[in-house]
Every structure is written in C-alpha cells, then in structure tokens.
Image (cartoon, rainbow, N blue to C red):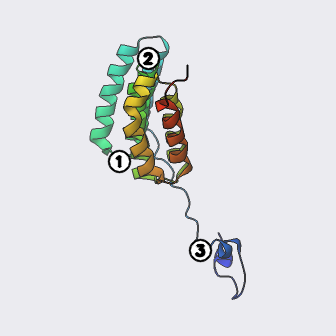
C-alpha cells in the first residue's frame, strides 16, 4: 500500500472501512535465508538415497543434518523447519505414516511460531497434515485426534474452517459403522 493510499483525504471510504478496520501498510514478506551450499549438497545426497530406496541411510543422514542445523540456528528457524519436513517426508516414504503426521504437526507448529498462523506456508503445512492424517488407518487416525485437533486449534483458532473441517472428519471417524 502506498503512502498516498495510507493517508487518504478525510471522508474517503475504502473497503477496509466496511470491514471495520483501518488501513495498515503491508510489510514486504521476509525472504527465507539462503540454504548454504554444503547443506544443499547433503540434502541432495539424502534425496538420492531416499529415491534409491535406501531409506535407513537417508533417515540417518537427515537425523545428523537436523542436529547440525538445529545446533547452528535453533528450533525456531526456517532451515530447521525445512530439515524436519525432510524427515517427515522420509518417514512417509518408509511407510511410517503416523510418524510422518507427527513430524508434519511439529513443523506446522514451528511454522506458526516463526511465520504466523496466517502465513501461506503455515496454511500449506496444516493442509498437508490434514491430508496425510485422513489417509491413516482408523486406529492410527483416532490415536492422533487429540494432537491434530489441538495443533489446528492453536494455529488457526477454535472456529476456523480448518478446525471445523477436522471436527467433521473426527465425527466420521468415530461414528459407528453402519451394517
């Protein structure tokens, strides 16, 4: 929003007037920090191992790289979040879908902390959790209900579309099977 739009003449009605708010200048989106070349090479090796079906090796390398990145940047950093998303993906590839949901829930919460609940990356992260959670066998899905619902409520709010959709899915999941 330009400064000219921010300070309109008195009496100028804008769409934000009808929303009950005042115009706020938009801040430029923070650019994610560049990934160092050494980390890129390690990620490429992890991806190659995963693609070759060497999931144990890929997971072990991802664990080491995660520890290194976390020690360097801390938990609340985009590099850490992205590395943990790699670990979630590897868990999914290895067939540990409930574990992958757990990792993705973890990264969605971290994204909400770092980027905010309304950031597109956070919204994408929770959509990914929801999509993967819905594919779990009913027993695994039911076991994760408290964590999924708590995370979505924490990130998006109790009355958000994400929580409402999740509650509907929970109702379907826990409904008695018709014979």
Q: Quadrant of residue 78?
A: top left
Q: Residues within 10 Å of mark 1 (few under 14, many from 20)?
A: some
Query: Where's residue 36, x and y in %?
Result: 42, 37
Cβ atoms under marks 3 and 1 closer than 8 Å: no
Q: Which residue is the site of mark 2?
A: 95
Tag of residue 108: none
Eye-nearest disc, 3 or 1:
3
Q: Nearer the viewer, residue 147 or 142?
A: 142
Q: Which residue is the site of mark 1?
A: 76
For this view, does 31 lie left or right of residue 60? right
Q: Which residue is the site of mark 3?
A: 21
Q: Nearer the viewer, residue 22 or 161?
A: 161
Circle 2: element type:
loop
Question: At x 37% / y 30%, what residue is drawn?
Answer: 143
For this view, does 104 lie left or right of residue 178? left
In the image, farthest residue toward the front: 179
Kindly report the distance in space between the C-alpha atoms of the residues bearing marks 1 and 2: 28 Å
Q: Residues within 10 Å of mark 3 (few under 14, many from 20)?
A: few
Kindly report the distance in space between the C-alpha atoms of the residues bearing marks 3 and 2: 48 Å
Question: At x 51% / y 51%, what residue is drawn?
Answer: 31
Quadrant assignment for the C terminus: top right
Quadrant assignment for the N terminus: bottom right
Eye-nearest disc, 1 or 2:
2
Query: Where's residue 6, x and y in %?
Result: 64, 77
Kindly report the distance in space between the C-alpha atoms of the residues bearing marks 3 and 1: 31 Å
């Amino acid at each position: 929003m330009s400064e000219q739009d921010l300070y309109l003449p008195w009496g100028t009605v804008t769409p934000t007037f009808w929303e009950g708010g005042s115009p706020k200048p938009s801040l430029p989106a923070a650019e994610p920090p560049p990934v160092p070349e050494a980390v890129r090479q390690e990620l490429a090796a992890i991806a190659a191992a995963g693609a070759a079906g060497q999931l144990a090796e890929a997971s072990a390398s991802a664990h080491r790289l995660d520890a290194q990145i976390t020690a360097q940047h801390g938990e609340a950093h985009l590099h850490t979040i992205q590395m943990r998303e790699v670990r979630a993906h590897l868990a999914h590839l290895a067939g540990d879908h409930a574990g992958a949901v757990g990792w993705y829930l973890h990264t969605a919460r971290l994204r909400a902390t770092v980027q905010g609940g309304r950031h597109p990356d956070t919204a994408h992260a929770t959509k990914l959790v929801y999509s993967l959670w819905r594919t779990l066998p009913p027993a695994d899905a039911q076991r994760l209900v408290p964590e999924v619902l708590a995370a979505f409520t924490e990130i998006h709010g109790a009355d958000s579309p994400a929580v409402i959709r999740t509650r509907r899915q929970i109702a379907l999941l826990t409904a008695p099977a018709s014979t």
